[in-house]
Image: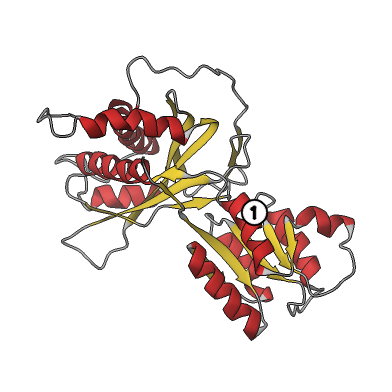
């Protein structure tokens, strides 16, 4: 049976008590959470810097210059309502209406927190074979489109954030008997142009490109990845039986996109660098997979078994 993996998730850690801080740090490590410790004064600015968070761990008695931690919880919720806030209670009084609406889970014991994190952050399980396969076929497609770039990837993780990274995004549907949703690529326009100036692409394709040509370049990369995904993971006769759709909401001013689902999204960051100029900043391309319409990993397991059984046949599979 294909192994299901619990991926990492980044969480904002707002805790001042040394004892609770250490317990939460160990808790995060045990679950694969990447904790970002911050003070109350840094909390909102950190939200602006990180567009790929999974949630917030907040202490009710956290010292704040203006107001208190409950006021901060409401401010965080207003800025990023999709992020679940896990509030460590230090008082017995019931939470007010606004605070109760902002807080996803109030806890006093780690067992309760563990259950809430599992339910909120890891509600979708991704088979390890699928995650690793997506990384392999995506890096292969990027190396084809950017043959002179060194392509690396960070460890895959899940996000609750709906904030778009950069200015250039692509979106393509993914549909099979075991999944329905979308794949996105996101990057910064200036970094993509700079990468082409550095010679990441084919000979003759330089950095003097207008935004339409850069859009087309990222679109072609997306198409290559989709083709590889289709060849490997979508059987020719595969059509999902449930053909429902939900509106996709895009707010360009806020750089926000919603697929109508609160489930966490699979996120992988790729870094394209110039091996001849190791000191230059890399081109970052963020890949997100959103299975908002159908997600049945057990069907993926059944589908993947024939590939495992035929792995030793000697046939060559092209992507």
Furthest toward the top, the residue is 237
- Report the side of 155 relative to 57 (left or right): left
Instruction: Please report the residue visible at 46 percent of the width from the left and 53 percent of the height from the top.
Output: 6
User: In the figure, 296 relative to 25: above or below?
Assistant: above
Q: Secondary structure at mark 1?
A: loop
Q: Which quadrant does the N terminus fall into?
A: top left
The answer, for residue 173, to whether it is visible in the render is yes
Residue 198: x percent and y percent? Answer: 22, 53
- Report the side of 162 relative to 189 (left or right): right
Q: Quadrant of residue 312?
A: top left
Relative depth, front residue between 174 and 23: 23
Instruction: Please report the residue visible at 49 percent of the width from the left and 32 percent of the height from the top.
Output: 296
Furthest toward the front, the residue is 1
Instruction: Please report the residue visible at 74 percent of the width from the left and 80 percent of the height from the top.
Output: 63
- Report the side of 308 relative to 58 (left or right): left
Residue 162: x percent and y percent? Answer: 58, 46
User: In the figure, 129 relative to 77: above or below?
Assistant: above
The answer, for residue 229, to whether it is visible in the render is no
Relative depth, front residue between 3 and 287: 3
**Total count of labels:** 1
Relative depth, front residue between 317 and 203: 317
- Report the side of 12 relative to 206 (left or right): right
Instruction: Please report the residue visible at 58 percent of the width from the left and 80 percent of the height from the top.
Output: 22
Q: Which quadrant does the C terminus fall into?
A: top left
Residue 281: x percent and y percent? Answer: 32, 62
Furthest toward the bottom, the residue is 18
User: In the figure, 178 relative to 30: above or below?
Assistant: above
Report the residue marked by disc 1.
Answer: 83
User: In the figure, 67 relative to 106: above or below?
Assistant: below
Residue 180: x percent and y percent? Answer: 49, 27
């Amino acid at each position: 049976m294909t192994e299901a993996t619990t991926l990492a998730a980044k969480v904002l850690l707002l805790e001042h008590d040394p004892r609770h801080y250490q317990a939460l740090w160990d808790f995060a490590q045990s679950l694969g959470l990447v904790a970002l410790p911050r003070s109350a004064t840094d909390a909102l600015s950190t939200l602006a810097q990180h567009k790929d968070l999974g949630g917030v761990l907040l202490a009710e008695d956290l010292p704040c210059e203006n107001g208190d931690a409950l006021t901060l919880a409401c401010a965080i919720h207003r800025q990023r309502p999709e992020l679940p806030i896990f509030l460590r209670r230090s008082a017995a009084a019931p939470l007010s209406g606004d605070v109760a609406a902002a807080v996803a889970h109030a806890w006093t014991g780690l067992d309760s927190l563990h259950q809430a994190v599992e339910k909120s952050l890891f509600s979708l399980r991704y088979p390890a074979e699928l995650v690793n396969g997506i990384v392999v076929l995506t890096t292969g497609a990027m190396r084809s489109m950017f043959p002179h770039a060194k392509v690396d990837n960070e460890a895959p993780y899940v996000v609750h954030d709906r904030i778009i990274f950069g200015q250039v995004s692509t979106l393509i549907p993914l549909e099979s008997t075991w999944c329905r949703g979308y794949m996105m690529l996101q990057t910064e326009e200036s970094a993509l142009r700079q990468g082409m100036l550095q010679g990441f692409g084919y000979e003759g394709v330089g950095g003097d490109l207008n935004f339409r040509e850069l859009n087309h370049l990222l679109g072609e990369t997306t198409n290559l990845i989709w083709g590889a995904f289709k060849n490997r993971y979508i059987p020719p006769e595969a059509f999902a039986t449930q053909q429902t759709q939900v509106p996709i909401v895009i707010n360009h001013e806020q750089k926000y996109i919603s697929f109508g689902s609160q489930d966490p999204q699979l996120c992988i960051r790729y870094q394209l660098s110039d091996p001849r100029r190791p000191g230059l900043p890399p081109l970052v391309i963020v890949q997100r997979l959103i299975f908002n319409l159908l997600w049945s990993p057990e069907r993926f397991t059944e589908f993947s078994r024939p590939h495992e059984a035929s792995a030793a046949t000697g046939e060559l599979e092209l992507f």
